[in-house]
Amino acid sequence: MADPQASGSPPRRGARGRRTAALIALVLGLAGFVISATGMATQLLPRRFSAAQQEQIKSWEIAGRWQQLTAGQIFPASVSYQLPATVLQDATPLNLNALRVAIAPQSGCGTGVTTAAAASVLRHDGCQAVLRATYVDATGSYVMTVGVAVLPSAAAAKKADRSLVAPPGLTAANQSEADRLPAGILVVRYHGTAAAMYNYSRQISASFAKGPYLVMYAVGYADSRPRVPVVSDQYAYKEMTSLAGGVAQSVADTLAAPPASPHCPGTPGC
């Protein structure tokens, strides 16, 4: 009897086994591809955030903006502001521009402010840094410094603002009182500029909180020539406060502008 293994015909069972194994491998490969593609799609699709998560993400973005923006974006070279029509006894307000003199180097919370009390308030509330820039009006008559204290939260910024207690008003009536400045931002005077002879004896200062930022300003005359008290010159008072308030609000709006909502299709309230 002939040996069946010597006939030269390969066994059919082995061929079928190889085809079956190849088919199984193909099915498993397709299954793995589908699972991988599903996982990738899940990662690429926008996440769904709750309302609380959306607010937290927005707060994180605003809190980090002072580090993400350049100094020139926070403190632009020119800022528009308006002098109220009532001051001019006119029907329309006057549009003016504040011009940036210089941006001060970033400082710690113990410097850049007028008093040790102000530094203590900022440190106590978790201040991380103080940013400052100095501006003048187009005629070079008034100088102001806007300062931003970076706090860890909006609540901390509001608390620090309440602690400073520096409503807009005249700081001192004469030079002998100029050393008793209220707690607030310290004006940066640059030699060779309109801010070099800033007069602390006629200073108006104020602060307000916006988001996690405490925005402070101080404004006064650009030179030390004798002047009547600011409160006795309503035009000067209004122009100073309009200049300083306009610049400070511009800086605050840039830092604390609401970011776009996180992507969350299908989530109520998104």
Image (tube, rainbow, N blue to C red):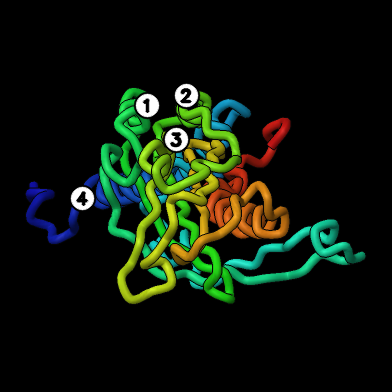
In this figure, which residue is indicated by the disc labeled 2? Answer: 163
In this figure, which residue is indicated by the disc labeled 3? Answer: 182
Disc 4/disc 2 C-alpha distance (Å) = 94 Å
> Looking at the picture, how far across and down is residue 83, in whole percent?
74, 62
**Comes first in the chain, label 1 or label 4:** 4
Q: Residue at x 50, y 30 (%)?
A: 161
Most foreground residue, 166 or 110: 166
> Looking at the picture, how far across and down is residue 52, in whole percent?
58, 26
Q: Residue at x 61, y 57 (%)?
A: 240
Q: Amino acid at mark 3?
A: Pro
Q: Amino acid at mark 2?
A: Ser
Q: Amino acid at mark 4?
A: Pro
The C terminus sits in image quarter: top right
Q: Amino acid at mark 1?
A: Val
Tell me the quarter of the picture where residue 238 sits. bottom right
Mark 4 lies on a secondary structure that is loop
Mark 1 lies on a secondary structure that is helix
Q: Nearer the viewer, mark 1 or mark 3?
A: 3
In this figure, which residue is indicated by the disc labeled 4? Answer: 11
**Comes first in the chain, label 1 or label 3:** 1
Contact between labelled residues 1 and 2, with CB atoms less than 8 Å apart: yes
Disc 2/disc 3 C-alpha distance (Å) = 12 Å
Q: Nearer the viewer, mark 4 or mark 2?
A: 2
Disc 1/disc 4 C-alpha distance (Å) = 91 Å
Q: Residues within 10 Å of mark 4 (few under 14, many from 20)?
A: few
In this figure, which residue is indicated by the disc labeled 1? Answer: 121
Establish if 173 lies above or below 105.
Answer: above
Mark 3 lies on a secondary structure that is loop
Q: Residues within 10 Å of mark 3 (few under 14, many from 20)?
A: many
Tell me the quarter of the picture where residue 254 sits. bottom right
* Residue 138 visible in the displayed image: yes
